[in-house]
Amino acid sequence: MGAQLRVYKRRIQAVTATKKITKAMEMIAASRIVKAQRKVAASQPYATELTRAVTAVATGSDANHPLTTEVETPTRAAVLLITSDRGLAGGYSSNAIKAAERLRERLASEGKEVDTYIVGRKGVAYYGFRERKVAESWTGFTDNPAYSDAKRIAAPLIEAIQSETAEGGVDELHIVFTEFVSMMTQNAVDARMLPLSLDEVAGESTRKGEILPLFEFEPSAEDVLDALLPRYVESRIYNALLQAAASEHAARRRAMKSATDNAGDLIKSLSRLANAARQAEITQEISEIVGGASALADATAGSDK
Protein backbone atom coordinates (compact mmCIF):
# COMPACT_ATOMS: atom_id res chain seq x y z
CA MET A 1 0.00 0.00 0.00
CA GLY A 2 2.90 2.41 0.73
CA ALA A 3 4.25 1.91 -2.82
CA GLN A 4 0.90 2.93 -4.30
CA LEU A 5 0.85 6.07 -2.19
CA ARG A 6 4.32 7.01 -3.44
CA VAL A 7 3.15 6.57 -7.04
CA TYR A 8 0.26 8.98 -6.46
CA LYS A 9 2.56 11.53 -4.83
CA ARG A 10 5.02 11.38 -7.74
CA ARG A 11 2.20 11.88 -10.23
CA ILE A 12 0.83 14.82 -8.26
CA GLN A 13 4.27 16.44 -8.25
CA ALA A 14 4.67 15.89 -12.00
CA VAL A 15 1.23 17.29 -12.84
CA THR A 16 1.81 20.27 -10.52
CA ALA A 17 5.05 21.09 -12.36
CA THR A 18 3.26 20.83 -15.71
CA LYS A 19 0.48 23.07 -14.44
CA LYS A 20 3.01 25.77 -13.54
CA ILE A 21 4.43 25.62 -17.06
CA THR A 22 1.05 25.81 -18.81
CA LYS A 23 -0.03 28.67 -16.53
CA ALA A 24 3.13 30.61 -17.39
CA MET A 25 2.59 29.99 -21.12
CA GLU A 26 -1.01 31.14 -20.80
CA MET A 27 0.07 34.41 -19.19
CA ILE A 28 2.81 34.99 -21.80
CA ALA A 29 0.36 34.40 -24.66
CA ALA A 30 -2.20 36.74 -23.06
CA SER A 31 0.37 39.53 -22.82
CA ARG A 32 1.43 39.08 -26.45
CA ILE A 33 -2.13 39.23 -27.76
CA VAL A 34 -2.44 42.89 -26.76
CA LYS A 35 0.72 43.83 -28.66
CA ALA A 36 -0.40 41.85 -31.70
CA GLN A 37 -3.83 43.53 -31.67
CA ARG A 38 -2.19 46.96 -31.63
CA LYS A 39 -0.06 46.06 -34.64
CA VAL A 40 -3.13 44.81 -36.54
CA ALA A 41 -4.99 48.05 -35.81
CA ALA A 42 -1.97 50.14 -36.82
CA SER A 43 -1.56 48.34 -40.17
CA GLN A 44 -5.22 48.47 -41.18
CA PRO A 45 -5.48 52.14 -42.28
CA TYR A 46 -2.46 51.85 -44.61
CA ALA A 47 -3.81 48.68 -46.24
CA THR A 48 -7.27 50.24 -46.64
CA GLU A 49 -6.04 53.47 -48.20
CA LEU A 50 -3.64 51.64 -50.50
CA THR A 51 -6.47 49.43 -51.74
CA ARG A 52 -8.62 52.52 -52.36
CA ALA A 53 -5.78 54.16 -54.29
CA VAL A 54 -5.27 51.09 -56.47
CA THR A 55 -9.01 50.91 -57.11
CA ALA A 56 -9.17 54.59 -58.03
CA VAL A 57 -6.30 54.26 -60.50
CA ALA A 58 -7.74 51.12 -62.07
CA THR A 59 -11.31 52.41 -62.39
CA GLY A 60 -10.15 55.80 -63.67
CA SER A 61 -8.13 54.37 -66.54
CA ASP A 62 -8.09 51.64 -69.16
CA ALA A 63 -4.85 50.17 -67.88
CA ASN A 64 -4.27 46.49 -68.63
CA HIS A 65 -2.36 45.28 -65.58
CA PRO A 66 -2.10 41.95 -63.71
CA LEU A 67 -3.08 43.77 -60.53
CA THR A 68 -6.61 44.34 -61.80
CA THR A 69 -7.08 42.44 -65.08
CA GLU A 70 -8.92 39.13 -65.01
CA VAL A 71 -7.50 36.36 -67.19
CA GLU A 72 -10.14 34.89 -69.46
CA THR A 73 -9.12 31.27 -68.87
CA PRO A 74 -6.89 31.10 -65.77
CA THR A 75 -4.89 27.88 -65.60
CA ARG A 76 -2.54 28.41 -62.68
CA ALA A 77 -2.89 29.86 -59.18
CA ALA A 78 -0.55 30.50 -56.28
CA VAL A 79 -1.72 29.88 -52.71
CA LEU A 80 0.07 31.37 -49.70
CA LEU A 81 -0.67 29.39 -46.51
CA ILE A 82 0.16 30.96 -43.13
CA THR A 83 0.61 28.58 -40.18
CA SER A 84 2.64 28.72 -36.95
CA ASP A 85 6.22 27.82 -36.11
CA ARG A 86 5.32 26.36 -32.72
CA GLY A 87 2.65 24.03 -31.41
CA LEU A 88 0.60 24.05 -28.20
CA ALA A 89 -2.01 26.27 -29.88
CA GLY A 90 -4.92 23.90 -30.19
CA GLY A 91 -6.30 23.57 -33.72
CA TYR A 92 -4.83 26.85 -34.98
CA SER A 93 -2.50 25.45 -37.66
CA SER A 94 -4.67 22.46 -38.55
CA ASN A 95 -7.67 24.70 -39.24
CA ALA A 96 -5.61 26.87 -41.59
CA ILE A 97 -4.26 23.78 -43.36
CA LYS A 98 -7.80 22.41 -43.78
CA ALA A 99 -8.91 25.74 -45.28
CA ALA A 100 -5.97 25.58 -47.71
CA GLU A 101 -6.91 22.02 -48.66
CA ARG A 102 -10.48 23.07 -49.41
CA LEU A 103 -9.23 25.98 -51.51
CA ARG A 104 -6.83 23.71 -53.36
CA GLU A 105 -9.64 21.27 -54.17
CA ARG A 106 -11.87 24.10 -55.40
CA LEU A 107 -9.15 25.53 -57.63
CA ALA A 108 -8.33 22.07 -58.98
CA SER A 109 -12.01 21.49 -59.79
CA GLU A 110 -11.88 24.70 -61.83
CA GLY A 111 -9.01 23.27 -63.87
CA LYS A 112 -6.25 25.34 -62.26
CA GLU A 113 -2.82 24.08 -61.29
CA VAL A 114 -1.86 25.19 -57.77
CA ASP A 115 1.55 26.35 -56.55
CA THR A 116 1.79 26.35 -52.76
CA TYR A 117 3.82 28.83 -50.70
CA ILE A 118 3.98 28.22 -46.95
CA VAL A 119 4.74 30.31 -43.87
CA GLY A 120 5.40 28.43 -40.61
CA ARG A 121 7.04 25.13 -39.65
CA LYS A 122 3.70 23.40 -39.03
CA GLY A 123 2.59 23.85 -42.63
CA VAL A 124 6.04 22.90 -43.95
CA ALA A 125 6.02 19.74 -41.83
CA TYR A 126 2.50 18.82 -43.02
CA TYR A 127 3.42 19.07 -46.70
CA GLY A 128 6.85 17.52 -46.17
CA PHE A 129 5.41 14.47 -44.40
CA ARG A 130 3.03 13.92 -47.34
CA GLU A 131 5.82 14.57 -49.86
CA ARG A 132 3.94 17.38 -51.56
CA LYS A 133 5.74 19.96 -53.62
CA VAL A 134 6.14 23.42 -52.07
CA ALA A 135 7.22 26.33 -54.27
CA GLU A 136 8.82 28.23 -51.38
CA SER A 137 8.59 28.42 -47.58
CA TRP A 138 9.51 30.78 -44.73
CA THR A 139 9.85 30.03 -41.01
CA GLY A 140 11.01 31.55 -37.75
CA PHE A 141 8.87 34.69 -37.33
CA THR A 142 5.19 33.75 -37.19
CA ASP A 143 4.61 34.86 -33.59
CA ASN A 144 6.15 38.32 -34.17
CA PRO A 145 6.27 39.18 -37.89
CA ALA A 146 7.92 42.32 -39.25
CA TYR A 147 7.25 44.21 -42.47
CA SER A 148 10.57 42.96 -43.82
CA ASP A 149 9.21 39.41 -43.54
CA ALA A 150 6.20 40.41 -45.63
CA LYS A 151 8.52 41.89 -48.27
CA ARG A 152 10.53 38.66 -48.47
CA ILE A 153 7.34 36.65 -48.91
CA ALA A 154 5.84 39.04 -51.45
CA ALA A 155 8.87 39.10 -53.76
CA PRO A 156 8.47 35.62 -55.36
CA LEU A 157 4.68 36.01 -55.47
CA ILE A 158 4.94 39.31 -57.35
CA GLU A 159 7.46 37.76 -59.71
CA ALA A 160 5.09 34.85 -60.34
CA ILE A 161 2.09 37.08 -61.14
CA GLN A 162 4.18 39.28 -63.42
CA SER A 163 5.90 36.40 -65.20
CA GLU A 164 4.70 35.70 -68.71
CA THR A 165 6.32 32.27 -68.98
CA ALA A 166 4.23 29.13 -68.59
CA GLU A 167 6.66 27.63 -66.08
CA GLY A 168 6.80 30.42 -63.52
CA GLY A 169 3.73 32.55 -64.18
CA VAL A 170 0.43 32.35 -62.33
CA ASP A 171 -2.91 33.96 -63.09
CA GLU A 172 -4.18 34.33 -59.51
CA LEU A 173 -2.80 34.86 -56.02
CA HIS A 174 -4.70 33.51 -53.01
CA ILE A 175 -3.88 33.71 -49.31
CA VAL A 176 -5.04 31.47 -46.46
CA PHE A 177 -4.65 32.79 -42.93
CA THR A 178 -6.44 32.92 -39.58
CA GLU A 179 -8.50 36.06 -39.13
CA PHE A 180 -8.53 37.51 -35.63
CA VAL A 181 -12.14 38.35 -34.68
CA SER A 182 -11.91 38.41 -30.89
CA MET A 183 -10.10 36.77 -27.99
CA MET A 184 -12.45 33.79 -28.27
CA THR A 185 -13.02 33.68 -32.04
CA GLN A 186 -10.45 33.17 -34.78
CA ASN A 187 -11.50 31.99 -38.23
CA ALA A 188 -9.37 30.37 -40.91
CA VAL A 189 -10.22 32.20 -44.14
CA ASP A 190 -9.05 32.29 -47.74
CA ALA A 191 -9.01 35.40 -49.91
CA ARG A 192 -7.91 36.25 -53.42
CA MET A 193 -5.22 38.92 -53.46
CA LEU A 194 -4.80 39.25 -57.22
CA PRO A 195 -6.38 40.14 -59.51
CA LEU A 196 -8.06 42.72 -57.28
CA SER A 197 -11.84 42.65 -57.50
CA LEU A 198 -12.61 46.28 -58.35
CA ASP A 199 -16.38 45.90 -58.23
CA GLU A 200 -16.22 44.46 -54.72
CA VAL A 201 -13.96 47.22 -53.40
CA ALA A 202 -15.94 49.97 -55.11
CA GLY A 203 -19.19 48.52 -53.77
CA GLU A 204 -17.75 48.48 -50.24
CA SER A 205 -16.78 52.14 -50.58
CA THR A 206 -20.26 53.03 -51.85
CA ARG A 207 -21.91 51.29 -48.89
CA LYS A 208 -19.73 53.35 -46.56
CA GLY A 209 -20.67 56.56 -48.36
CA GLU A 210 -17.12 57.11 -49.67
CA ILE A 211 -16.28 58.59 -53.06
CA LEU A 212 -13.19 57.33 -54.84
CA PRO A 213 -10.85 60.21 -55.80
CA LEU A 214 -9.99 61.12 -59.37
CA PHE A 215 -6.35 61.20 -60.46
CA GLU A 216 -4.27 62.33 -63.39
CA PHE A 217 -1.46 59.90 -64.16
CA GLU A 218 2.14 60.71 -65.05
CA PRO A 219 3.66 59.11 -66.99
CA SER A 220 0.85 56.50 -67.26
CA ALA A 221 -1.64 54.48 -65.23
CA GLU A 222 0.34 51.31 -65.99
CA ASP A 223 3.47 52.80 -64.42
CA VAL A 224 1.49 53.85 -61.36
CA LEU A 225 0.08 50.35 -60.98
CA ASP A 226 3.56 48.89 -61.43
CA ALA A 227 4.70 51.00 -58.48
CA LEU A 228 1.64 50.16 -56.37
CA LEU A 229 1.65 46.40 -57.05
CA PRO A 230 4.51 45.49 -54.66
CA ARG A 231 3.19 47.81 -51.94
CA TYR A 232 -0.31 46.35 -52.23
CA VAL A 233 0.81 42.72 -52.03
CA GLU A 234 3.22 43.48 -49.18
CA SER A 235 0.57 45.30 -47.15
CA ARG A 236 -1.99 42.52 -47.62
CA ILE A 237 0.53 39.86 -46.58
CA TYR A 238 1.74 41.92 -43.61
CA ASN A 239 -1.80 42.46 -42.36
CA ALA A 240 -2.51 38.72 -42.74
CA LEU A 241 0.69 37.86 -40.84
CA LEU A 242 -0.28 40.18 -37.99
CA GLN A 243 -3.81 38.79 -37.78
CA ALA A 244 -2.41 35.26 -37.86
CA ALA A 245 0.04 36.10 -35.05
CA ALA A 246 -2.74 37.54 -32.89
CA SER A 247 -4.87 34.47 -33.61
CA GLU A 248 -1.97 32.16 -32.74
CA HIS A 249 -1.44 33.84 -29.37
CA ALA A 250 -5.18 33.75 -28.63
CA ALA A 251 -5.40 30.07 -29.58
CA ARG A 252 -2.34 29.25 -27.46
CA ARG A 253 -3.75 31.16 -24.46
CA ARG A 254 -7.02 29.26 -24.76
CA ALA A 255 -5.25 25.90 -25.13
CA MET A 256 -2.94 26.56 -22.18
CA LYS A 257 -5.87 27.69 -20.01
CA SER A 258 -7.66 24.46 -20.83
CA ALA A 259 -4.50 22.47 -20.03
CA THR A 260 -4.09 24.32 -16.72
CA ASP A 261 -7.70 23.66 -15.75
CA ASN A 262 -7.38 19.98 -16.69
CA ALA A 263 -4.18 19.72 -14.64
CA GLY A 264 -6.00 21.19 -11.65
CA ASP A 265 -8.80 18.66 -12.02
CA LEU A 266 -6.29 15.81 -12.34
CA ILE A 267 -4.46 16.97 -9.19
CA LYS A 268 -7.74 16.94 -7.26
CA SER A 269 -8.52 13.44 -8.51
CA LEU A 270 -5.04 12.15 -7.65
CA SER A 271 -5.21 13.80 -4.24
CA ARG A 272 -8.45 11.97 -3.46
CA LEU A 273 -6.88 8.67 -4.55
CA ALA A 274 -3.78 9.40 -2.46
CA ASN A 275 -5.94 10.21 0.57
CA ALA A 276 -7.90 7.00 0.08
CA ALA A 277 -4.66 5.01 -0.18
CA ARG A 278 -3.28 6.70 2.95
CA GLN A 279 -6.52 5.99 4.83
CA ALA A 280 -6.43 2.37 3.72
CA GLU A 281 -2.81 2.12 4.86
CA ILE A 282 -3.67 3.62 8.26
CA THR A 283 -6.66 1.28 8.59
CA GLN A 284 -4.48 -1.71 7.77
CA GLU A 285 -1.85 -0.63 10.32
CA ILE A 286 -4.53 -0.21 13.03
CA SER A 287 -5.96 -3.64 12.17
CA GLU A 288 -2.50 -5.19 12.40
CA ILE A 289 -1.86 -3.51 15.79
CA VAL A 290 -5.25 -4.60 17.14
CA GLY A 291 -4.74 -8.10 15.80
CA GLY A 292 -1.27 -8.30 17.29
CA ALA A 293 -2.46 -7.05 20.66
CA SER A 294 -5.32 -9.55 20.68
CA ALA A 295 -2.99 -12.40 19.81
CA LEU A 296 -0.57 -11.29 22.52
CA ALA A 297 -3.40 -11.14 25.07
CA ASP A 298 -4.59 -14.63 24.10
CA ALA A 299 -1.03 -15.98 24.42
CA THR A 300 -0.59 -14.37 27.82
CA ALA A 301 -3.91 -15.77 29.04
CA GLY A 302 -2.93 -19.27 27.88
CA SER A 303 0.42 -19.19 29.72
CA ASP A 304 -1.26 -18.13 33.00
CA LYS A 305 -3.37 -21.26 32.93
Image: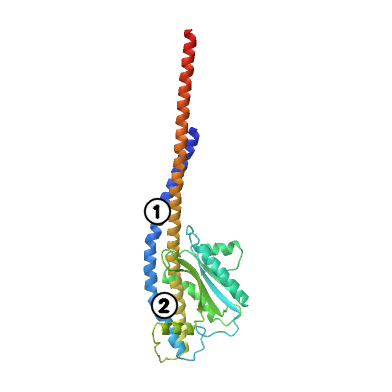
Helix, strand or loop status at disc 1: helix
Find residue 116 and name its label.
none
Give the crowd class for mark 2: few <14, some 14-19, many >=20 residues within 10 Å: many
Find residue 47 and name its label.
2
Quadrant assignment, res 244? bottom left
What is the count of numbered marks?
Answer: 2
The answer to whether 212 appears left or right of 99 in the picture is: left
Q: Residue at x 39, y 63 (%)?
A: 33
In x, y percent, where is residue 14? 45, 44
Question: Residue 227: in sight, yes or no?
Answer: no
Find residue 24 and name its label.
1
In x, y percent, where is residue 136? 54, 70
Give the crowd class for mark 1: few <14, some 14-19, many >=20 residues within 10 Å: some
Q: Amino acid at mark 2?
A: Ala
Quadrant assignment, res 73? bottom right
Helix, strand or loop status at disc 2: helix
Q: Residue at x 37, y 72 (%)?
A: 41
